């Protein structure tokens, strides 16, 4: 068996990568406070694995996940 996962990124890491959150702590609070939508639904799990094509909305700004 292989341990290979499809290319993913955790939601909190994605928020830091996009500059939406400056720190992991800030990302955690934004997610826990229900400020983050993933594919149109509120997401409160900071470890949520995002895949290419997922849409993340924070404070009215939309990002499309591209993982390579």
Image (cartoon, helix red, strand yellow):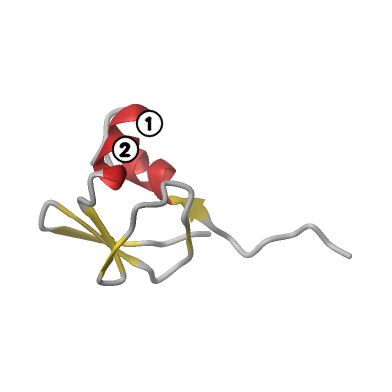
In the rendered image, the vertical position of residue 15 relative to residue 22, given as above or below: below
Q: In which quarter of the image is the N terminus?
A: bottom right
Query: Which residue is at 42% across, 62% downward?
Result: 66
In the rendered image, the vertical position of residue 60 relative to residue 21, given as above or below: below
Q: Do the residues labelled 2 and 1 touch (CB within 8 Å)?
A: yes
In x, y percent, where is residue 40? 25, 71
Q: Residue 44 carries which label?
A: none
In x, y percent, where is residue 55? 30, 67
Q: Residue 24 carries which label?
A: 1
Find the distance from the CA under tag 2 to the CA under tag 1. Answer: 5 Å
Query: Which residue is at 58% across, 60% downward?
Result: 7
Occupied quadrant, residue 25 = top left
In the rendered image, the vertical position of residue 59 relative to residue 21, given as above or below: below
Occupied quadrant, residue 5 = bottom right
In the rendered image, the vertical position of residue 14 relative to residue 4, given as above or below: above
Query: Which residue is at 48% across, 59% downward?
Result: 67
- Callout 1: few (<14), some (14-19), or many (20+) C-alpha neighbours within 10 Å? some
Badge 1 marks a residue whose secondary structure is: helix
Extreme residue in the left direction = 60
Badge 2 marks a residue whose secondary structure is: helix
In x, y percent, where is residue 57? 21, 59
Extreme residue in the right direction = 1
Q: Mark 2 points at which residue?
A: 27
In x, y percent, where is residue 28? 34, 37
On the rendered structure, is 54 left or right of 4?
Answer: left
């Amino acid at each position: 068996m292989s341990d290979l996962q499809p290319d993913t990124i955790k939601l909190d890491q994605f928020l830091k990568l996009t500059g939406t959150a400056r720190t992991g702590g800030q990302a955690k609070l934004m997610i826990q406070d229900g400020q983050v939508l993933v594919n149109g639904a509120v997401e409160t799990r900071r470890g949520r694995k995002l895949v290419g094509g997922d849409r993340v909305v924070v404070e009215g700004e939309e990002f499309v996940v591209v993982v390579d």
